Image (cartoon, rainbow, N blue to C red):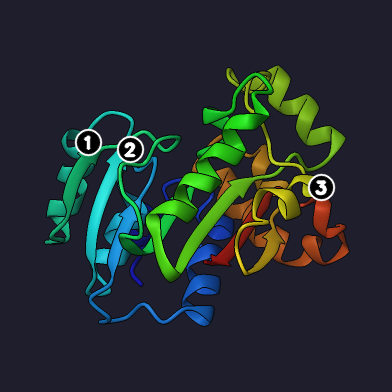
Amino acid sequence: MNKNLLKDIIDWDIVNWSKALSYWEKNVELQNKNLQCLELGGRKGGLSLWLSLKGNNVICSDLENPEKEAGSIHKKHNANIRYQAIDATNIPFQNQFDVIAFKSILGGIARNNNNALKQQVISETYKALKENGVLLFAENMESSFLHKLTRKLFVKWGAEWNYLKPEEIERLFSQFKRVQFITVGFLAAFGRNETQRRVLGKLDRIVEKFIPKKKRYILIGIAIK
């Protein structure tokens, strides 16, 4: 995949977050399956672009219709994607999709420790998926004490964001018949720009081997209905 396309799909800390694409592609058949797909929280529509270029039917959604911002990116790649305003806590579909995907949305939706909204989003995806449908998700984890401190000091929404905790995972996805996930990344979260994050992300390939899985900062998963 060329760098410009990968940037449009992943956008931030590309080295680490792009591992989600590799993990999903390795474990789920997505290419030329004509699947019915939905991206939640797709402000720039990166995952919609990725799914569409694999030959699937895709709705790119966010709380407000994302066409204005995502549409210009999708047109660059000649991707045929539909757009819709959808509240991830109240998805207006039932047994509709083969694939639902999201990246880094739970913490914002459930900001200020509103943990019930995390569960509500996951339950809504379960409802909207067909039997044997697949949820592809990648989320920011609480990670280490250093991550928590740095976010509060240097990220304007860091004190409000509801970062995913390892002990929440089993409960959140308990409706699904199978869940699998990996965790990646550590140093790149501290990068102040994408150049720094790229360098630190490459170091993460070595460093994360020595970091406990629950202290890494990205969770990448697959849940089967």
Q: Residue shown at 26%/48% (left/top)? A: 60
* Residue under pointer 3: 167
Relative horizontal placement of residue 74, taking residue 219 as reference (left or right): left
What is the secondary structure assignment of the residue under circle 3? helix
> Hey, which quadrant is residue 207 in on the image?
bottom right
Cα distance between the residues tagged 2 and 3: 28 Å
**Residue 209 at x, y percent in the picture:** 82, 67
**In the rendered image, is residue 186 in sight?**
no
Q: Amino acid at mark 3?
A: Glu
* Residue under pointer 2: 43
* Residue under pointer 1: 69
Q: Amino acid at mark 1?
A: Glu
Relative horizontal placement of residue 206, taking residue 157 as reference (left or right): right
Q: Nearer the viewer, residue 195 or 147?
A: 147
Closer to the camera: disc 2 or disc 3?
3
Residue 188 to residue 155: above or below: below
**In the rendered image, is residue 96 in sight?**
yes
Classed neighbour count for the residue bearing mark 2: other residues with Cα under 10 Å, few (<14), some (14–19), many (≥20): some
Q: Amino acid at mark 2?
A: Arg
> Hey, which quadrant is residue 58 in on the image?
bottom left
